[in-house]
Image (cartoon, helix red, strand yellow):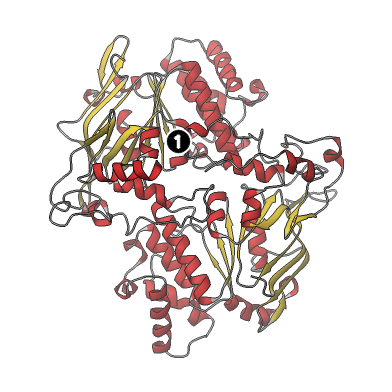
Amino acid sequence: MTKPLMSVKDLTIQFRTDEGIITTVNEISFDIAPGEVLGLVGESGSGKSVSAKALMRLNAGNAIYGPKSSIVLNLDDGPVDVLALRREKDMQVVRGGAVSMIFQEPMASFAPAISIGDQMVEQLLVHTNMSKKEAREHSIDMLARVGISEPSKRIDQYAFEFSGGMRQRAMIAMALSTSPKLLIADEPTTALDVTIQAQVIDLMKELVDEYGMGILFITHDLGVIAQTADRVAVMYLGNVIETGEVRDVIRHPSHPYTKGLLNAIPHLHDLDRPLTPVPGDIPSPLERPTGCVFHTRCAYAIPGKCDREIPSPNTMSPGHTSACFVAKEIHNNEAEAVA
Amino acid sequence: MTSSTHISVKDIGVHFTLGRRLIGKPPVLRAVDGVSLDIPKGCFFGLVGESGSGKTTLGRAMLKAVPITTGHIKYDDGDVQYDIATIGKDELKDYRSRAQLIFQDPYAALSPRMTVRDIIAEPLEVMGITKTREETDNRVREIAAKCRLNLEHLRRFPHAFSGGQRQRISIARALVCEPKFIVADESVAALDVSIQADILNLLKQLQQDMDITFLFISHDLSVVAHTCDHVAVMYLGRLVETAPTRSLFNAPRHPYTKALLSAIPSLDPDDAGRAQRLSGEIPSPANPPDGCRFHTRCPHAREKCKIDVPKWRQMADEHFVSCHYAEELAEASEPVPAG
């Protein structure tokens, strides 16, 4: 593996609000290699969507990026320093050019009064050298590719004429039609029924194999991550608290929060297992806990240590790190429990 | 659980007329079309299906919140007996204090202008259950404690609370008039996974303490599997299968139930590819297919399925299914994938 496709280092994002400055993302780092699917998991308010939007510079004007933050996109003709982009025109490379995004709500992401086809053609005219006719033909091909029947008829329809699953397919077709190097998928299956979710996940897997782009897959559903991602980063209150190969993290969770999440979700093969919630509520971003951000809800918290010192990432196995003072113990316990 | 039947639904239909026509009859959407089921007293009864299956409409029919077109719903909690389909005005008033609804979205369900105390007290005041303010306050405090809300929270407004706390407030509001029957419509769907388990455990606890019958409507089969005693699966306005939870999950008989189960993303990354995929999407309930309504998506559909409506048949103890080929398919069935 040479250079990663996208390299995020010490990304800090704050928002200026009436209630003061809110830190939503705190010094997170991750890389995405070409052809790799990185899962970003976390609950609402963990900062996963804000991080993803930063990669495309889509955050609102009151966002402040920390001085050490860096986001570098390595393209064939050299690296792009995403945070240094100033002009809207320059930002097009990360907004549909080399980076595309699939949003959660396909209904809200299409303009209601413009046909699906016109929207697909418009972005191709912006990002490629295609003529209008070529762009339309390419769009029809893409719609067919994602499994929409009668694409040459469908392309002139509007978003409201599509069902939820079809809208999400059209969204994927649109995002992929410019052949992006990196695809950001922000909860792409959350609004869909399970049966349709399964279809969309299968489709995305096929497309990764075919197009070989890197994907940042954002979701709160660990099951979806297990089925799609190669590596996973778990976020809590703006921090990446655990990261590693998806098998390592799900089989040997080494952070109390990851472990808590896995205990809180229902497992179909073991109906007798009680559901154990993660105690307490997610703190407000206005009141970020001192020390380890998770100590207020953590069963392993050491008084006087976890509420004062910030844990740095501990390596469990190659590529698997956990930012917790007792990560080793939890990791070993989990390994025993599995064995 | 062998106790008496609390709610007995007989051949219920909820039809909506779509628009008007100058000539001829307007089309009719049969959201619920000939559903019969019995809910025993004290049962945690699950109702699952995709969006558009009619599960919410069926739940609302049981609360007389939508007009019932055909059929009967017998309600018998030991004290009173009503036929909900033909219930009179005065009786309905009494029924409202016996049957309550918990909504999906705790952010939309609570008035931002009322304190938590006033929100929880409102049903008592509207129904004239308590006579003095002191009596009301006592009831509010009692139920708040049961729902694990702090007494100091009662003076605050809903905006000060997280999603999990808000859902506890809306549960307290539903329970304050000591209902016998609760419809919980997707009550954990909007919550984060770490909180979801907490609310599910709370609902179970309250059900046992207060001897309530629950209709738990959800699209999430794994949540239903962990919470409910008995499950009914709906598709396009009709029941396709009902069974005790264990029987349904260990030996699903209907191809739709099997497909729903296999569509749940497994937490085991190596478990991919075993899933049985459904093609296409749920057809419009305004124009449902003839014969078995599932035949357009069923991997086992044959000629007979396109013509004959399958009968509602008993397969095992309390296990009912409507599929022509349930016996054959049961023999060929694979074990449920681990989730």
| Pick the front one: A39 or B67 | A39
Across and down, in percent, residue B11 comes to: 79, 62
The amino acid beneath tag 1 is Ala
Relative height, residue A24 to residue B206 (above, below)? above
User: Quarter of the image containing the N terminus of chain A?
Assistant: top left
| A304 with respect to B121 (left or right) | left
Chain letter behind tag 1: A
Q: Position of residue A181 (x, y in %)?
A: 39, 18
* Residue depicted at 43% across the width and 54% down the height: B191
Whether residue B192 is visible, yes or no, is no
Q: Which residue sits at x=62%, y=56%?
A: B245
- Say above or below: A81 vs A168: above
Residue B216 image position (x, y, % from top left): 58, 61
Callout 1 crowding tier (Cα within 10 Å): few <14, some 14–19, many ≥20: many
Instruction: Identify the image quadrant of residue B41.
Output: bottom right
Q: Nearer the viewer, residue A54 or A193?
A: A193
- Compare residues A267 and B322 and report the one nearer the observer: A267
Is residue B23 toward the left or the right of residue B287 in the image? right
Looking at the image, residue B47 sits to the left or right of residue A295; the answer is right
Q: Quadrant of the C terminus of chain A?
A: top left
Residue A183 visible in rendering: yes
Rendered residue at 56%/28% (across/down): A116
Q: Quadrant of residue A197?
A: top right
Q: Tell me residue A91's x, y (percent).
A: 31, 23
Q: Give the mark count.
A: 1
**Which residue carries the number 1 mark?**
A226
Disc 1, SS: helix
